[in-house]
Image: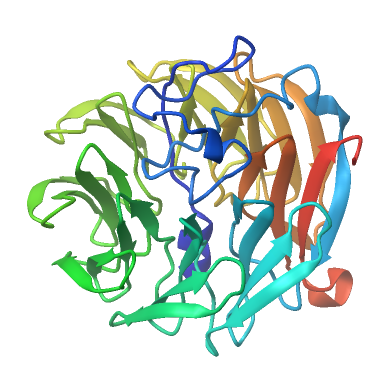
Amino acid sequence: MKQRTILCLSVLLLTVSLATAQVPCSPTIIPRASLFVNWPQFQYDAAHSGCNPYETILNTSTVSRLQLKWQYQFIQGGYSSGAVADGVIYTGQSASDGVLLAINANTGDLLWYFSSQYGNFSSPAVANGVVYVGAGDHNIYALNAKTGTMIWQYATGDRIAGAPTTAKGTVYVGSADNNIYALNAATGVLVWKYTTGGEVDYSPAVANGIVYSGSADQKIYALDAGTGALIWNFPTGSAYCSASVANGKVYVGSDQVYALDAKTGKLVWNYPAQGSVSPALANNAVYLTTSGGTAFALNAATGALIWAHNMGDNSNIYNSATVANGVVYANTNHYFNALDAHTGALLWNFTLEGNSEAAAGWPVVANGVVYLGSYCLYPFQCGSGYLSVFSLNGQ
């Protein structure tokens, strides 16, 4: 369950193009130049768009030239997706002592690491020079992004599998103790917590003053971001992913894909895609992958199918798609693909090491570079998994 929820992704959004060549992500996100080379948190932003609106280097014409730039081999399998900020990628590895790594994004050199002395780390978030990450020892940690020095820690009642989300000076995080927490980002002081009917192993999404979070009780909750007061909840069935918010709608993958009114929780549409994970959205389309190895695009307003692409691997997929500049990045356990966002046509792919290495987490795209973690299904065959980094011509 932990692996599934950590790797599960959520996402979506529509936006205004920042350059003529770019495919928009979301009009609700105000561009900031400081984010140009960054992918600061789970699914890019607090609303979990899964779309980088600043990417200009990689597009449908250039993505076929992606080559491996460097790899970092994990001591034990890497299960955490990364955050990229100021030339550093932060990612967790599934070691018995729970290690968070800070790696030079250009060279692959290790800069520092932080150990919780127990279990996995969630995917991290980076804001204002601080890295926020949850751990299997029940704590959420705030670390100095340059040195890894701990600034504060807060203990929940159980493990933290889902990534923390940062928004307006607050860190929102779920715990397996059934609670959703809001903490002061500077001090770690509890602002509020809300108790659901099951484990919260998902990353909360935050948009327009509302926190959206799934729970193992098979509901998605909408809470006031300032007070934690319940606004609405909606039964989603066997949801294993985080919610994503855009254009007044909340999207969530489950036994089917749901689009809900963000203010009321009323069902707008649903699409029968069993085993789908959290969607990414750009250009008025919702992009998803399913456990059957298919990537597909739906009309964001109506839920109508636009295209579907079989990625050639029927093994389970727990990783969401990523969108940047007209390209959808989607992976199965063994194949990493770049697809045309408008047609679903295959533009580029990379095969992981036989049947022994499997992709972990969602792809991260920032400033012409693509990051993807993997873990080893059979360590005697492929070691411990890698953080693989791709760029144009490997440069």
Does 36 sit above or below residue 1? above
Q: Give the left or right position of residue 70, taking residue 281 as reference.
A: right
Q: Is residue 289 visible?
A: no
Residue 226 percent coordinates (x, y): 15, 53
Does 260 sit above or below residue 141? above
- In the foreground, 239 or 124: 124
- In the foreground, 13 or 278: 13
Residue at horizontal 32 percent and vertical 82 percent from the top: 155
Q: Is residue 32 visible?
A: yes
Does 37 sit above or below residue 113? above
Q: Give the left or right position of residue 103, taking residue 148 as reference.
A: right
Can you name the residue that lies furthest to the top here?
20
Residue 294 percent coordinates (x, y): 60, 34
Figure label count: 0
Occupied quadrant, residue 73? bottom right
Coloration mode: rainbow
Occupied quadrant, residue 256? top left
Q: Give the left or right position of residue 113, taking residue 264 as reference.
A: right
